[in-house]
Amino acid sequence: MDCPVPGSEAMMEHTFSVGKPFCGEAGDAMQQPEVYAKLTEIFHDVFDDPSIVLQPSTTAVDVPEWDSFNHINLIVSIEAEFRITFQTSELEAMHNVGALAEMIGRKLAAEGKS
């Protein structure tokens, strides 16, 4: 199966489907619900808002406290929790939580951390 384009509608549907792995071998990829569960905990902590419900289409516009300072805190927290690092170009390419979750899944699979 070919991977949908990150950030596309097809990718959002693919990555938000419960139980579907990220692109790659099923045994090598962290499952989508696990990534969203961890991301949700991180968002709740960084933004001090337990009411945040993440969707693949969620962007900074949807989270009132998501300013440039909290964006840095968010990325640092994600990198620490998942034990990954992002390149600047990768961060610039992520326009919503769906693309972020997909990138996390790809990095975990590539690094064998899933």
Image (cartoon, rainbow, N blue to C red):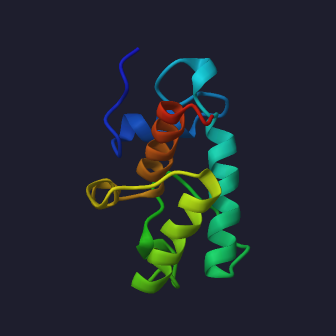
| Lateral position of residue 31 relative to residue 70, left or right | right
Asked whether the viewer can see residue 52, the reply is: no
Observer-nearest residue: 61 or 47?
47
In the rendered image, residue 106, in percent from the top left (x then y), is placed at: 46, 36
Please tell me which residue is depicted at 50% across the width and 46% down the height of the picture.
104
Q: Find residue 18 and report its image quarter.
A: top right
In the rendered image, residue 73, in percent from the top left (x then y), is placed at: 52, 76
Please tell me which residue is depicted at 70% across the width and 52% down the height of the picture.
37
Please tell me which residue is depicted at 45% across the width and 85% down the height of the picture.
69
Residue at the top extreme of this rendering: 1
Against 49, residue 75 (above or below) is above
In the rendered image, residue 83, in percent from the top left (x then y), is placed at: 58, 52
| Lateral position of residue 59 relative to residue 105, left or right | left
Observer-nearest residue: 15 or 93?
93
Please tell me which residue is depicted at 40% across the width and 83% down the height of the picture.
68
Asked whether the viewer can see residue 42, the reply is: yes
Against 10, residue 41 (above or below) is below
Against 17, residue 103 (above or below) is below
Against 85, residue 113 (above or below) is above
In the rendered image, residue 87, in percent from the top left (x then y), is placed at: 33, 56
